[in-house]
Amino acid sequence: MSLQQRPVPQTLCGALQKEPNCKCLVLSVLIYGCLAAVTWCRCANVTKVAFMGMLYLVYLVECYHSPIRIDLLHAESQDSVLSKISQLKSAQPTIWWKAVSYHYVRRKRQITRYRNGDNYTTTQVYYERINTHAATSFYYYDYCGVKDISKELILDPKVPITKVNLSKGFAFSNMRSATEFEEARSRFFAEQVRQIAS
């Protein structure tokens, strides 16, 4: 089992699937199509050149608002990313539960609508969520101990870092710890049910 982890490079198809960049791609194809049409017509018609100029301006606006450009603008240095990841690794983990009791209340409101230039008032029925009780509890695992099993991150110095995806989870080293955790969790939620019922 390897104790190192490397970043996953992003491919063009993956970027097109995850990011809404199809508009930029379509505009690029339109620009190249306009260039081909203008070359084919030998710049004889001024309106085609003006149309191409307008498309190019739209293309520049799309490129300026491109999510990839914005991500690259906010790229972090590798040292800062590695220091933040080491801070996360050294931070004391917290396991907590939250119980929220709620119900829905049926309410009515008057709204004004417009049809064919006339306005009329109708009654709209909607449901609003009301939280009646909320409680939080922490699991104290000090006697069990904690071990971080995440892999060491190896970065390529040539590639800027724009996004870091983290995942977290926990596992128990023995059955006794798992049983105590489940008992504490069940006890917390049972107490909340008793408080609501009383």
Image (cartoon, rainbow, N blue to C red):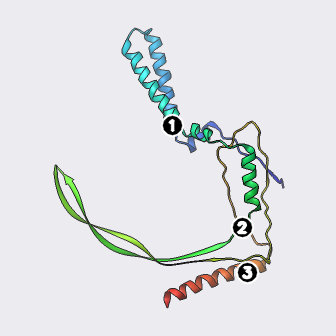
Q: Alpha-carbon neighbours of circle 3 within 10 Å: few (<14), some, or many (≥20)?
A: few
Tell me where residue 12 sits by quadrant: top right
Disc 1 marks a residue whose amino acid type is His
Which label number is shown at residue 93?
2
Q: Which residue is drawn at 48% across and 29% down?
A: 59
| Front label number (3 vs 1) | 1
In the drawing, does residue 118 fall left or right of residue 152?
Answer: left
- For the residue marked with disc 2, what is the amino acid? Pro
User: x and y percent of residue 148 in the render?
Assistant: 79, 63
Per the model, the C-alpha gap separating discs 3 and 1 is 52 Å
Query: Above or below — where is 37 with respect to 192?
Result: above
Task: Answer with mark 2 or mark 3, whichever residue precedes in sequence.
Answer: 2
Question: Which residue matches tag 3?
Answer: 179
- How far across and how far down the image is residue 44, in percent? 40, 8
Per the image, the residue denoted by label 1 is 65
Please state which of residues 9 and 73 is positioned toward the viewer in this rendering: 73
Label 2 with label 3: CB-CB less than 8 Å = no
Check if mark 3's residue and mark 1's residue have beta carbons within 8 Å: no
Image quarter of residue 109:
bottom left
- Residue at image location 59% in from the left, 85% down from the top: 190
> What is the C-alpha distance between the residues marked 2 and 3?
19 Å
Question: Image quadrant of residue 185?
Answer: bottom right
Residue 185 is marked as none
Q: Is mark 1 on a helix, strand or loop?
A: loop
Q: Where is residue 126 in the image (x, y as percent from the top left)?
A: 33, 68
Up the image or down, 188 lies above or below 64; here it is below
Q: In this view, does 189 lie to the left or right of 182?
A: left
Residue ID at (69%, 61%) = 168
Label located before the other in sequence (1 or 2): 1
Q: Which of 57 and 6 is in front in this view?
A: 57
Circle 2 — which element? loop
Q: How far apart are marks 1 and 2 (CA)?
A: 38 Å
